[in-house]
Image (spheres, helix red, strand yellow):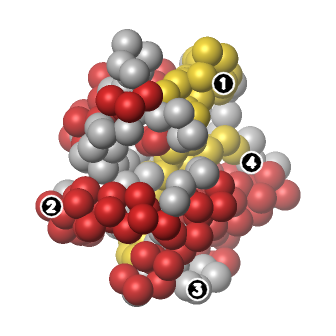
C-alpha cells in the first residue's frame, strides 16, 4: 500500500497544527503509523547569507520554499521510501545541520500555508483539507506564537504581518480553497473527520 498523504492548508494560525496534532494522536491510537511534516521545513538553505540579510527575506512567498526538494520528498514518501528531510530553525532563519528521518509509514500529514502552492506535489496527495479561522483571532495567535516561541518582538511581528503575511494570504493561500476536498473551521473539534480519514486508511491496509 502506498502512503496516504493528507495535505492541510489554510491561512496562518488558523488551526492547522492543532488539527494535525489531534489527528496524529488519534491515528496512533488506531494503529495507523503516522508522521507529520510542515512545508516550513523546506525553506531554502540560506547559510550563505548573513543573519541580517536572512531577516530581510520574504518567507511568506512560495519562492522561499525549495519546491523541488519538497516535491521529491512527497514523491518518495508516497512510494513508501525512507528519507531524510531538513529541520528548520526559526530563531536564525536557517536550516539546522541535523536532519529528520521519515521511515515507511501509513499516513503522512503535510501542513502549511504552501501545501497546495506546487502543482507537481498535488498529485501525491490523497486528500486535501483547508482550515480557516476569523482574521482577528489569527492575528492575535500569530503575535503570541512568534513572541513566545520564536523570540520575535511585537513590532517585528506586526511589520511582517502587514508587509508580507497579509498580502500572501490574499494572493496565494485564499485561492487554494478552490483546490481542496474539505473545508473546516479551526475553532471546531472535527472528530468525525479524523475518524473518516483513519477509516479510509485502515480499509486499504
Element assignment for label 2: helix
Ranked by sequence position, the earlier of labels 3 and 2 is: 2
Of residues 200 and 3, the one drawn nearer to the viewer in this rendering:
3
Q: Secondary structure at mark 1?
A: strand
Residue ID for mark 3: 188
Locate residue 55, reporting x and y percent: 38, 38
**Which part of the image, by quadrant, shows the C terminus?**
top right
Query: Residue 91: x, y in percent?
Result: 57, 40
Image quarter of residue 21: bottom right
Left or right: where 188 falls relative to 10 = right
| 2 or 186, nearer to the observer | 186
Name the residue rendered at 64%, 82% in the picture: 189
Is residue 80 visible from the viewing direction of this image? no
Q: Are marks 4 and 1 in contact (CB under 8 Å)?
A: no
Q: Where residue 32 is drawn, which disc sits there?
A: 4
Q: Residue at x 19, y 63 (%)?
A: 167
Instruction: Tell which tag, 3 or 4, sits nearer the viewer.
Output: 3
> What residue sits right under mark 2 in the picture?
171
Indicate whether 48 appears above or below 78.
above
Q: Residue at x 23, y 36 (%)?
A: 63
Q: Secondary structure at mark 3?
A: loop
Residue 100, disc: 1
Q: Local crowd at mark 4 within 10 Å, few (<14), some, or many (≥20)?
A: some
Q: Label 3 vs label 1: CA separation?
A: 31 Å
Marks 3 and 1, the one that precedes in the sequence: 1
Q: Nearer the viewer, residue 193 or 110?
A: 110
**In screen coordinates, is 132 left or right of 178?**
right
Discs 4, 2 touching: Cβ within 8 Å: no
The quarter of the rendered structure image containing the N terminus is top right
For discs 3 and 2, the disc positioned in front in the rendered view: 2
Dot in front, 4 or 2: 2
- Mark whose residue sits in front, 4 or 1: 1
Amino acid at each position: 500500500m502506498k502512503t496516504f498523504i493528507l495535505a492541510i492548508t489554510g491561512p496562518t494560525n488558523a488551526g492547522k497544527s492543532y488539527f494535525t496534532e489531534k489527528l496524529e494522536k488519534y491515528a496512533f491510537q488506531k494503529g495507523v503509523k503516522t508522521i507529520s511534516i510542515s512545508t516550513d521545513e523546506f525553506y531554502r538553505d540560506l547559510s550563505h547569507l548573513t543573519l541580517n540579510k536572512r531577516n530581510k527575506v520574504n518567507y511568506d512567498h512560495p519562492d522561499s520554499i525549495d519546491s523541488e526538494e519538497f516535491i521529491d520528498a512527497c514523491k518518495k514518501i508516497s512510494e513508501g521510501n525512507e528519507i531524510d528531510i531538513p529541520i528548520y530553525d526559526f530563531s536564525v532563519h536557517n536550516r539546522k545541520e541535523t536532519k529528520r528521518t521519515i521511515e515507511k509509514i501509513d499516513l503522512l500529514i503535510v501542513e502549511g500555508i504552501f501545501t497546495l502552492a506546487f502543482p507537481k506535489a498535488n498529485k501525491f496527495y490523497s486528500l486535501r483539507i483547508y482550515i480557516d479561522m476569523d482574521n482577528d483571532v489569527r492575528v492575535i495567535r500569530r503575535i503570541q506564537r512568534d513572541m513566545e516561541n520564536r523570540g520575535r518582538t511585537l513590532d517585528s511581528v506586526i511589520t511582517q504581518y502587514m508587509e508580507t503575511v497579509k498580502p500572501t494570504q490574499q494572493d496565494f493561500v485564499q485561492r487554494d480553497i478552490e483546490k481542496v476536498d474539505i473545508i473546516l473551521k479551526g475553532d471546531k473539534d472535527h472528530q468525525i473527520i479524523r475518524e473518516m480519514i483513519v477509516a479510509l486508511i485502515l480499509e486499504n491496509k
